[in-house]
Image (spheres, rainbow, N blue to C red):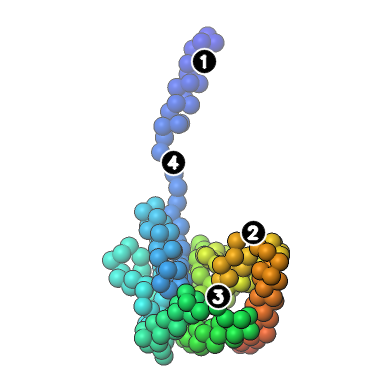
Amino acid sequence: MSACERAALCFLVLLGLSQAPLCVTAGKIIIWPGEFSHWLNVKVIIDELIARGHDVTIITHSATPSVNTDQSRGYSVEIIQVPHTKQDVFNMLDKFTKYWMYDVQHGNMIQTSLKIKEIFDMSTEQNQALCRELFAREDLLEKWRKEQFDILLTDPMNMCGELLALKLNLPFIISLRYSIGSTLERLCGQLPAPPSYVPVVSLGYTDQMDFPQRVKNTLFNLFQDFLFTFVTVSKWDPLYTEFMGK
């Protein structure tokens, strides 16, 4: 075979390989979404996963005001029964939204932090109730283990997402837009955000802060760190210890 013939043969082989369909395997994904805009954000991901042939299972609860539980949407749904109602969830969100949109920038830092704590306490109570009901369902957890999911996609609106990943022995991805004061991003995600340069979420500042704004930005950071460490962590650490047994 001449050099020209060998070259032509190699070209035809490579051309054939380039035209061959790619062989991919669809995965099994379990998703624990948040509510309202958090659900709308992750719904885009869900639709794309389904379009690509992945098997998607959604976890939600009986009081969900936003997650579509229609099984015909292309995903399966597991609904956890909770003691609170849809109206309770709406009331908590309404209180938070009104304060966030109209009042947060006008109060002093102590008033703002205490008000945020009050609203978060309401959210924590509902969230912990959901977690307790979910992890009480050992039959459901065992069913999910047998289904051999590849990954968990969760939202920090559900504080037990990473705990569920531990229970199922799964890697997990957190879908997060932002947290108040960028607390989760800084303390959990190790995001570098020096307060004298990076404005925290909720104050409405830009990166061009004057000196009083930098001071307020720094103090607000410290207040949020305090709330997270001594309020949020103190409420969730005992629950995690209870569920994990250590």
Q: Residue 178: x, y in percent?
A: 55, 67
Q: What residue type is labelled 4?
A: Leu
Residue topped by disc 4: 22
- Residues at marks 2 and 3, CA–CA distance in whole angstroms: 17 Å
Q: Which of marks 2 and 3 is nearer the N terminus?
A: 3
- Residues at marks 4 and 3, CA–CA distance in whole angstroms: 53 Å
Residue under the point 36% across and 78% down: 65
Work out whether residue 170 or residue 5 is closer to the camera in this orientation and state it: 170
| Mark linked to residue 182 | none
- Residues at marks 1 and 3, CA–CA distance in whole angstroms: 74 Å
| Mark linked to residue 208 | 2
Q: Which of marks 1 and 3 is nearer the N terminus?
A: 1
Q: How crowded is mark 2: few (under 14 residues within 10 Å), some or many (20 or more)?
A: few
Q: Which of marks 1 and 2 is nearer the N terminus?
A: 1
**Residue 6 visible in the shown view:** yes
State whether residue 70 is above or below residue 50.
below
> Do labels 1 and 3 touch, CB within 8 Å?
no
Q: In this view, does 224 lie to the left or right of 121?
A: right
| Mark linked to residue 105 | 3
Which numbered mark, 2 or 4, is in the foreground of this view?
Answer: 2
Q: What residue type is labelled 1?
A: Arg
Element type where label 3 sits in the image: loop
**Residue 168 visible in the shown view:** no
Residue under the point 69% across and 75% down: 219
